[in-house]
C-alpha cells in the first residue's frame, strides 16, 4: 500500500457508510436472506440451505474503530439485518456487545494469542514458536473464558486476527485450532476460516483499504453473479477516524520496537 494512500485512508477519506447502507438495501431488494454465522452453520449441518434461495453472510472483524462498528450496527438495526461481529480483547465494549446479542446478531471472539505470545516472548522465527502451541492454546482458552464471563455471552465462533507478526513469521493464529481437543474444550462450533464456510459459499470476499475497497470483487458485483456470499468487513476501511487510527498506528509502532 502506497504511503500516500494509507494517509488518505486513515486520516482524510470520507465515510463510506452510505455505500454499506446501499449494499444492504440492494441485497434486500434482490432477495438475499441474511444469516449470522451460527445460522449459516446450522443450515449447513441440517442440510436446510434452500437451493433456490440467495444468502448473504456478513462478518465484521472489529480490529479497531468501535464508533464505525456501532454505525454498522445502527444501519443493520434499521433494516432488521442480522450479522456477526468479532471483537478483539482490546476492542471489547460489553454494553455494545450485549446490544448486538439481544438484537439477534452474533458476537464472536477475534483471537490473536499466537501473535501475542510471539511479541511477548520476542520470538523471531516460526521454528521457535512451534514447541509452544500447547501453552498458546491454554492462553486462548483462558482469554475466551474471560471474554464470555465479562460479556455473559456464549461464543460459538472465533475468527483469527491477522497481525504484522503473523506475516513476518509466516504463521497464522488459527494454527492452534488444528488441535481438535482444544476446539472441544473451547466449546465452539467452528472457526471463521474453516472449510465448512468456504466450501458452502459461492464466493468469499473482503473489504480492502483505499483505493481497492474490495477483493476479489465488490459485493454489488457478487450479488449479480452468486447465490451464497460470505463477506468480511473491517470498520477501518469504511471511513477515516484520525484519532483511532493514530492510536492503532502508535500501538503497532511500539509493539514493533519492543518485539
Image (cartoon, rainbow, N blue to C red):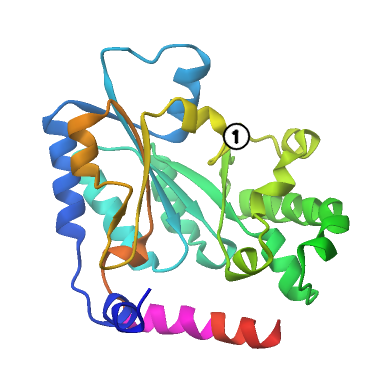
Where disc 1 sits, the SS reads strand
Does the magenta stretch mainly form a helix, a strand or a loop?
helix
Residue 206, image x and y in percent? 37, 50
Task: Say if 149 sits above or below 225 in the image.
Answer: below
Identified at 69% across, 67% down, the residue is 116
Q: Nearer the viewer, residue 96 or 254?
A: 254
Q: Residue at x 69, y 34 (%)?
A: 187
Residue positioned 44% across, 68% down in the render? 64
Residue beneath disc 1: 190
- In which quadrant of the rendered view does residue 121 lie? bottom right
Q: Is residue 206 above or below residue 183?
A: below
Q: Is residue 156 left or right of residue 206?
A: right
Which residues make up the magenta segment? 242-251
**Mark 1 crowd level (few <14, some 14–19, many ≥20, 10 Å Cα):** some
Q: Does residue 135 appear left or right of residue 250 in this picture?
A: right
Q: Position of residue 198 (x, y in %)?
A: 48, 33
Q: Quadrant of residue 205?
A: top left
Residue 239 falls left or right of residue 196: left
Q: How many marks?
A: 1
Q: Can residue 247 be found in the magenta stretch?
A: yes
Residue 245 forms part of the magenta stretch: yes
Q: Nearer the viewer, residue 96 or 212?
A: 212
x then y, percent, for residue 9? 29, 75
At 47% from the left edge and 78% from the top edge, which residue is drawn?
248
Q: Point out the image quarter for the C terminus.
A: bottom right
Q: Quadrant of the N terminus?
A: bottom left
Q: Residue furthest right?
A: 131
Which quarter of the figure has residue 7?
bottom left
Q: Position of residue 138 (x, y in %)?
A: 81, 52
Amino acid at each position: 500500500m502506497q504511503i500516500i494512500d494509507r494517509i488518505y485512508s486513515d486520516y482524510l477519506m470520507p465515510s463510506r457508510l452510505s455505500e454499506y447502507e446501499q449494499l444492504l438495501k440492494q441485497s434486500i431488494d434482490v432477495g438475499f436472506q441474511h444469516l449470522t454465522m451460527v445460522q449459516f452453520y446450522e443450515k449447513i449441518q441440517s442440510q436446510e440451505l434452500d437451493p433456490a434461495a440467495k444468502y448473504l453472510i456478513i462478518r465484521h472483524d472489529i480490529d479497531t474503530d468501535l464508533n464505525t462498528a456501532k454505525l454498522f450496527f445502527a444501519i443493520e438495526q434499521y433494516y432488521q439485518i442480522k450479522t456477526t461481529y468479532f471483537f478483539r480483547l482490546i476492542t471489547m465494549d460489553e454494553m455494545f456487545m450485549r446490544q448486538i446479542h439481544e438484537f439477534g446478531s452474533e458476537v464472536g471472539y477475534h483471537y490473536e494469542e499466537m501473535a501475542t505470545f510471539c511479541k511477548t516472548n520476542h520470538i523471531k522465527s516460526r521454528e521457535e514458536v512451534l514447541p509452544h502451541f500447547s501453552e498458546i492454546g491454554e492462553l486462548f482458552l483462558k482469554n475466551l473464558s474471560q471474554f464470555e464471563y465479562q460479556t455473559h455471552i456464549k461464543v460459538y465462533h472465533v475468527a483469527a486476527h491477522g497481525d504484522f507478526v503473523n506475516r513476518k513469521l509466516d504463521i497464522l493464529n488459527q494454527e492452534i485450532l488444528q488441535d481438535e481437543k482444544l476446539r472441544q474444550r473451547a466449546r465452539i462450533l467452528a472457526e471463521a476460516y474453516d472449510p465448512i464456510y468456504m466450501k458452502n459459499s459461492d464466493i468469499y470476499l473482503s473489504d480492502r483499504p483505499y483505493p481497492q475497497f474490495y477483493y476479489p470483487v465488490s459485493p454489488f458485483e457478487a450479488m449479480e453473479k452468486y447465490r451464497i456470499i460470505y463477506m468480511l468487513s473491517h470498520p477501518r476501511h469504511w471511513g477515516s477516524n484520525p484519532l483511532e487510527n493514530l492510536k492503532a498506528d502508535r500501538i503497532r509502532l511500539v509493539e514493533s520496537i519492543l518485539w
